Amino acid sequence: MPAIVTVLGEIDPATLGPTDCHEHLLIRGGLPIVLEPDFRLDSVDAAVAEVGDFQAAGGAALVDCMPLGVGRDARGLVEVAERTGATVVATTGFHRDLYYAADHWVRTYDAERIADLMVAEHTEGMEVSGYGGPFVERIAARPGAIKLAFSGPEPTPTERKLAAAVGMAQRRTGLPVVTHTDDERSAALQLSILDGYGVPPSSVVFGHMDRHTGVAGLAEVCRTGATVCLDWLGRHDRRPDSYVADLAAGLAAEGCLDGVVLGQDLARRGYWRAYGGGPGLANLVATFPALLRKAGLTDDHIRQLLVDNPRRVLTRLEPS
């Protein structure tokens, strides 16, 4: 039966509400917070407060895109979901090369063994340390997506190997793949590698595509059957959210809105009200819809971006 896998169990896709398809609720440990202390999102109470604001503004679901070995807090995500009632989807998989130490096991295990680790998270439950050892300790909660990340248009050898492992794991689990990209060149190569393992484009969501890619490039990716996530929202010190609204309107004009979802990727303390910053997670549903309307989109378009398209892309396929 079709289902979306959340940290509290499987749900009927028809019940999914307005969704932030790329977020980071907790980052506790790992190289990311060593390299950038502002990435430290270590308070469950803060996450509960932010998610509560998101819900009060009309939001219902969030995809936490923190994968293995870089500070994912599986237990914390379960607590956030239990305390708020929000739908929380966790991820297995991997981030960019620079977030793993030179002696990390991602550099020594082959793709097949790494795929086994991701599949086990889906079938047996998330490993609380991200396989940091020395023991394997799982919880019942399972990931609902697999992450893949490239550092640029040309991946490192480790990233290329991890992409192969993600392709294998997707075919064995049916889970959607959410990716970190820099532009359409990264997306094209990611899709090519995944296609080599039989991953259907409809199961792939390319993140961060609005950072450097215009409407034409985004539309080209959408026409492959994959989905692009417009998720560079809330960075009001760098560019206005109206820029992303205009991209969405442009994609609607190209007939490609069915291949678009929204997120924010607010993975910094400075972006969270609960840590004294802003605009906070509620921004996606509290203020951005007005900008979409101003750009010419209708309420039906907004529902498509926040509800209908996420329902489709987050639904697990039958494994093969």
Image: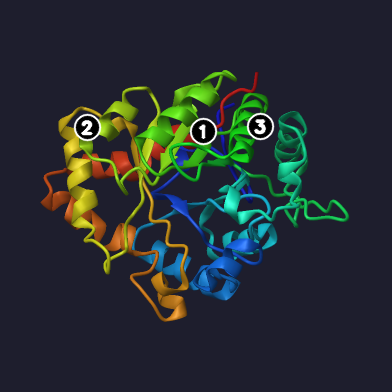
Of tags 3 and 1, the one toward the viewer is 3
Q: Residue 316 falls in which quadrant of the image?
A: top right
Residue on which disc 3 sits? 165
Instruction: For label 2, count other residues whose C-alpha is less than 10 Å away and answer few (under 14), some (14-19) or many (20+).
Output: few
**Cβ–Cβ under 8 Å for marks 2 and 1:** no
Q: Position of residue 286 (x, y in %)?
A: 29, 62
Q: Position of residue 120 (x, y in %)?
A: 76, 38
Residue on which disc 2 sits? 216
Q: Which residue type carries mark 1?
A: Thr
* Residues at marks 3 and 1, CA–CA distance in whole angstroms: 21 Å
Image check: 74 left or right of 285? right
Q: Which residue type carries mark 2?
A: Ala
* Residues at marks 2 and 3, CA–CA distance in whole angstroms: 30 Å
Q: Position of residue 118 (x, y in %)?
A: 70, 38
Residue on which disc 1 sits? 315
Q: Examine the rendered structure and indicate whether residue 16 appears above or below residue 102.
A: above
Colouring of the image = rainbow
Q: Name the residue at 43% across, 36% down.
A: 186
Which badge, 2 or 1, comes first in the chain's sequence? Answer: 2
